[in-house]
Image (cartoon, rainbow, N blue to C red):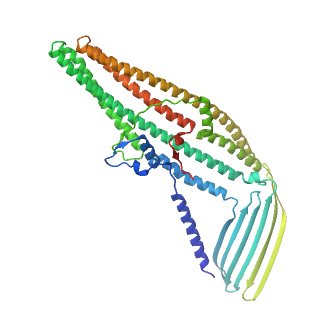
Amino acid sequence: MNNWRPLALVLLCSASQHSLANIVDQVSHPTVQGASASAFMLGKQATELTLADAVYLGLRSNREIRSAYLQRVAQKFDLRVSEDTFKPKLTLNANYTSAKGSSDRKQTATMGPTTDWLSEYGTRTTLGWKQEQGSGLGSGRYRSDGLDLAIIQPLLRGAGREVTTAPVRLAQLNEQANRLNLKSSVSSTISEIISTYRQLLRSQEQLTIARQALERARQLLAVNNALIDAGRMAAFDAVQTEADIASQELQVEEAQNQLDTDRLSLLRLLALDLSTPIHASETLQVSRINIDKIDALRLARAQQPRYLATLLGSQQADLNLVVAKDQARWDVSLVAGANQVRDRFERTSTSARSWESYAGVHLQIPVGDLASRQSRVNAQVGVETQALLLEDAHQALERDVSDVVRDLGTRWRQYEIAQRSHELATRKLAIEHEKLNVGRSSNFQVLSYESDLRNSENALLNARIAYLNAQTQLDQVLGMTLESWDIALNDY
C-alpha cells in the first residue's frame, strides 16, 4: 500500500488549522485618518492631553472597541462560510481495519474522495470515488475501485433560486447589521470618551474656581485686618471672612477629590495605567450651530446605525418567512445517478467490472408534523412584530432628532444667559469692593456677592460644557460621530 496518502492528509489538516489561526490574527482597528501615531504617544513627562489625543487613544486601546473588533473576526468568518454554500465541497475518507476470524485473517484499507455541490437552484450533485485494498490468508490480495455519481433536483421543498439562496442573503443582511452595530458601538464609546474628557475639564476648571475663590477670600481677610487696624471695622466682622475661608478650603478639597475620580474614569476608558498623570489641555471654545429639524431627520434616516439595523431586521424577517413556508412543502425530487465498480483478485488473476444507472422520483409527505407549521407561525409573527418595531423606530427617531435639535437651541440660550450673568456678577463684586474700601458697604454684602460670583462661574462652566455635549449628542443621534471626527472603521 502507498504510505504517502495518510501523511498527505495530516499535512492538509495542519495547513487548514494554520490558515484558520492566520484569520484570527487579522484583527482590524479604527483609526483617525491623517493622524500620526507618534503625535499621540504619552511619555512620562508629557501629561498634556487634548481631546483629539483622547479620541485617538480610545480608538487604539479601549477594551470595548477591541472586543467589538474581535467579534467581527468570527462574524466575517460566518459570512464566508455562508457564501461558500454553493462551492463544491471535497471530503477525503480513509479507513483501515484488521479482522481476525476462525478461518481467516484480513487487513483492509479504504480511501476515496467525495465531492458534493449544491447549485443556486437547489440541484445537489455528488461525485465520489473509492478504492479498497485488502489481503487475507485464505482469499489473498484483492483490490477494488469505483465511481459513484448522484444528482437530486427538488421540485417543491428546496426548489428555486429564491429559497436556496435565502440563507446566504440572510447571512449577508446579518453582516450588514453587524457592521452597523460596530459603527454604533464605536460611536457610543467615542461619545463616552468625549463626555468623560469634558467632565475632567469641568473638574479642573471647578478646582481653579475654588482656588481663586479661596485666594479672594484670603485677600478680603487681609483687607478686613487693615480696616480693623485702622479702626474702621469691628474685629468680630472678620469672623465671617474666616468662616468663608474655611468653607472655600473645603470646596477645594472636594474639587480635588472629584478631579481625581474623573481622571481615573478617563484613564479606564483609554485603557491606560491608572497612575498616569494626565491633564486635559483642551480649550472650551463654544460656537453656535444652526441646524434645521427636517434636514437633521433626513440625515438621521440615512446614517443612524440603530435605525438602519431595524430596517434590515424587516428584510431578515421576510426571508425567514420564505424559508419557513418552503419547509412546510412536500419533499418531491427527481433522482438520477450512475456507478461503476471494478474488482481485481490476485489468486484468480481475474478482473470484474460492473456499472449501473438509475432514475426515479423521491416523495416524502409529513403527516401530523406540527414542527413545520410552528416555524411558519413563528416566522409570520416575526414579520408582524418587526413591522411594529419599524413603526416605533420611525417615531423614536423623529422624537430623538426633535429632542436633540431643541436641546441644542436651549443649551445655547442658557449659555448666553450664564455668560451675561457672569459679567454682571463680576462687575457687581468689583463695585462692592470699592464701596467696602470707602466704608460704604459691609463685609457680609461682599461675601454674599463673592458667593454669587462663584455660582455664576460654575453656571457658565456648566452651560458651556452642556452645549458642547449637546453637539456630541447631536452627532450620535444623526449617526455622524465617526464622520465628524474623520474616523475610519477599517472593517474590511
Q: Residue at x 44, y 50 (%)?
A: 36
State the image quarter where residue 394 is shown.
top right
- Outermost residue, right direction? 360
Residue 168, percent across and down? 68, 53
Q: Looking at the image, which is closer to me, 319 or 408?
A: 408
Q: Residue at x 33, y 34 (%)?
A: 257
Q: Residue at x 30, y 16 (%)?
A: 431
Q: Looking at the image, which is closer to me, 415 or 396?
A: 415
323 to 405, vertically: above or below:
below
Q: Residue at x 15, y 14 (%)?
A: 230
State the image quarter where residue 426 is shown.
top left
Q: Is residue 370 visible?
A: no
Position of 193 with respect to 141 (left or right) is left
Residue 480, percent across and down? 55, 39
Residue 198, percent across and down? 42, 35
**Quadrant housing the N terminus:** bottom right
Position of 359 with respect to 237 (left or right) is right
